[in-house]
């Protein structure tokens, strides 16, 4: 089988006229941003806003991407001049665009010094991150640095050959400080509560462990704006690659699929300047917290509940799961339960937002896999579900619907589905969860007690809350006895 020639800069002119592409001189673009964790989510979101900035004529904000683990993204993008296609899909069709804001991709483990050098370039004003919750080497229950994390231990002992995002950022800060180079802004784009301030606490503690002077410099000179990002980005499949090749007449090794909806709320606190992202749809605010809470509790919390229950019920995609009327009713009711815990942004149409979420979940063109969303639950649950549960408990409100979502996660991490088939559980604590589940068997009370004993997820308080424990145990017993479909029908 022959493949079309590879997408690259020289072939942009031959693309079909309907496909948008870079119109600026990429050779004149400076590297103003280094992005750690150059995955699909960044390329569907921040890189697109930045592309619009470059097309407006401000060429100071090209992106150098860094992979902290795998060379896969570099190997896909660099041979095509770091260009890639973004396909915006909805049930009625799709639009295609080639994005050029990424100038280069480096692989940190191959040459740590090269990445530190790129981050130390005086042109760089922003270090941004999408390294997922587990990339912060922290305790999700407390938000503090995990000082026993293997990458933290390694990076403190080998500061010029770091592994973690924390190690690379700290090494670059130290080098720039020694050289008298202007400080940069460190901008988290991950789903963490108060992600900027959380990262500041983690990174400052890491820097303190390097030296108290460096920790003080981080506190005083580096800015950490909070952000909230919202766009659904399914994993790219081989079928997607074939489809894009047919549309372009060129091979794109790693195109990105996404939805029309996109949102970016940013705390306007940048120590050395920033792109004018607000001209292209971003919202610059003084306080991100209300937007963040609304997204984490309504979108992400519902997404996680939907993924675990949908997977257990045999649905491969979100659209398939939400087409089940019982699951749709449950998700709508879960959102209502979450809403009462929110302090809403001024003028927010929360009812319209919730309706839009259901419609986004129903987008059959996305093929967003429940298994993909279910990954790394130990890192996601504290932000997406457990905070809401704590707030409802504090107000004396029932928590049964949220407890069902937690129970579905517990059922999922047993590693065996309702048909007795193995579940490929992807989680930093997967082996620990499986051992606890094997010891507890199908005894809901024992399994709840064992998993709630994992303090990195549940902290110290929830395991001793009789109301919560009772609700989760009842839901898990029903999932074991009746299965997900029958159980969720009783919770809508």
Image (cartoon, rainbow, N blue to C red):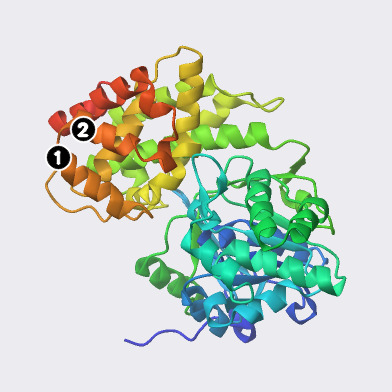
Where is mark 2, residue-wise? Answer: 446
Q: Is residue 101 above or below residue 131?
A: below
Q: Which mark is residue 441?
A: 1
State the residue in front, 130 or 159.
Answer: 159
Tell me if 319 is positioned left or right of 481 in this view. Answer: right
Q: Is residue 480 above or below residue 51?
A: above
Q: Determine which quarter of the picture holds residue 159.
A: bottom right
Q: Quadrant of the C terminus?
A: top left
Residue that appears at 55% across and 55% down? 136
Residue 4 visible, this orientation: yes
Q: How many marks?
A: 2
Tell me if 192 is positioned left or right of 462 in this view. Answer: right
Residue that appears at 69% across and 56% down? 208
Measured Cα–Cα span from mark 1 to mark 2? 8 Å
Tell me if 269 is positioned left or right of 454 in this view. Answer: right
State the residue in front, 404 or 120.
Answer: 120
Callout 1 touching callout 2 (CB < 8 Å): yes
Q: Determine which quarter of the picture holds residue 290.
A: top right
Q: Residues within 10 Å of mark 2 (few under 14, many from 20)?
A: some
Tag 1, which secondary structure?
loop
Q: Determine which quarter of the picture holds residue 385.
A: top left
Instruction: Tell me residue 463's x, y (percent).
Output: 37, 28
Instruction: Tell me residue 370's x, y (percent).
Output: 34, 48
Instruction: Tell me residue 12's x, y (percent).
Output: 62, 79
Q: Quadrant of the N terminus?
A: bottom left
Q: Which mark is residue 182?
A: none
Residue that appears at 71% across and 72% down? 119
Tag 2, which secondary structure?
helix
Q: Is residue 3 above or below residue 126?
A: below
């Amino acid at each position: 089988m022959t493949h079309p020639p590879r997408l690259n800069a020289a072939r942009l002119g031959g693309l079909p006229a309907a496909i948008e592409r870079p119109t600026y001189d990429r050779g004149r673009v400076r590297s103003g941003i280094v992005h750690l964790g150059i995955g699909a989510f960044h390329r569907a979101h921040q890189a697109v806003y930045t592309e619009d900035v470059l097309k407006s004529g401000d060429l100071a904000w090209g992106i150098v991407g860094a992979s902290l683990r795998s060379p896969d993204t570099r190997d896909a993008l660099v041979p095509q001049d770091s260009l890639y296609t973004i396909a915006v899909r909805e049930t009625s069709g799709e639009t295609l665009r080639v994005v050029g804001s990424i100038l280069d991709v480096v692989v940190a483990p191959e040459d740590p010094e090269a990445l530190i050098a790129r981050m130390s370039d005086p042109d760089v004003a922003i270090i941004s991150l999408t390294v997922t919750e587990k990339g912060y080497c922290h305790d999700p229950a407390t938000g503090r640095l995990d000082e026993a994390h293997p990458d933290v231990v390694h990076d403190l002992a080998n500061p010029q050959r770091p592994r973690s995002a924390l190690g690379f950022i700290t090494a670059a800060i130290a080098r720039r400080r020694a050289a008298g180079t202007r400080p940069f802004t460190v901008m988290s784009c991950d789903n963490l509560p108060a992600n900027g301030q959380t990262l500041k606490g983690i990174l400052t503690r890491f820097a303190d462990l390097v030296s108290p002077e460096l920790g003080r410099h981080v506190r005083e000179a580096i800015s950490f704006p909070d952000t909230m990002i919202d766009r659904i980005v399914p994993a790219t499949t081989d079928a997607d690659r074939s489809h894009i090749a047919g549309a372009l007449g060129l091979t794109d090794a790693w195109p990105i699929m996404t939805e029309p909806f996109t949102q970016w709320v940013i705390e306007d606190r940048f120590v050395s300047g920033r792109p004018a992202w607000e001209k292209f749809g971003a919202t610059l605010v003084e306080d991100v917290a209300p937007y963040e809470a609304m997204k984490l509790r309504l979108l992400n919390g519902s997404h996680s509940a939907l993924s675990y229950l949908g997977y257990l019920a045999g649905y491969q995609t979100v659209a398939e799961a939400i087409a089940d009327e019982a699951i749709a009713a449950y998700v709508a009711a879960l959102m209502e339960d979450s809403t009462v815990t929110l302090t809403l942004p001024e003028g927010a149409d929360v009812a319209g937002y919730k309706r839009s979420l259901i419609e986004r979940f129903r987008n059959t063109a996305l093929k967003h896999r429940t298994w993909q969303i279910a990954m790394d639950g130990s890192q996601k649950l504290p932000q997406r579900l457990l905070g809401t549960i704590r707030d409802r408990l504090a107000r004396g409100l029932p928590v049964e619907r949220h407890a069902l979502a937690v129970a579905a996660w517990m059922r999922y991490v047993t590693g065996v589905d309702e048909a007795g088939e193995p579940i490929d559980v992807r989680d930093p604590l997967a082996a620990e969860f499986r051992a606890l589940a094997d010891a507890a068997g199908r005894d809901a009370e024992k399994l709840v007690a064992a998993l709630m004993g994992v303090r990195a997820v549940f902290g110290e308080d929830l395991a001793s809350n009789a109301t919560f424990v009772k609700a989760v145990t009842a839901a898990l017993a029903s999932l074991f006895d009746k299965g997900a479909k029958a159980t969720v029908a009783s919770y809508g």
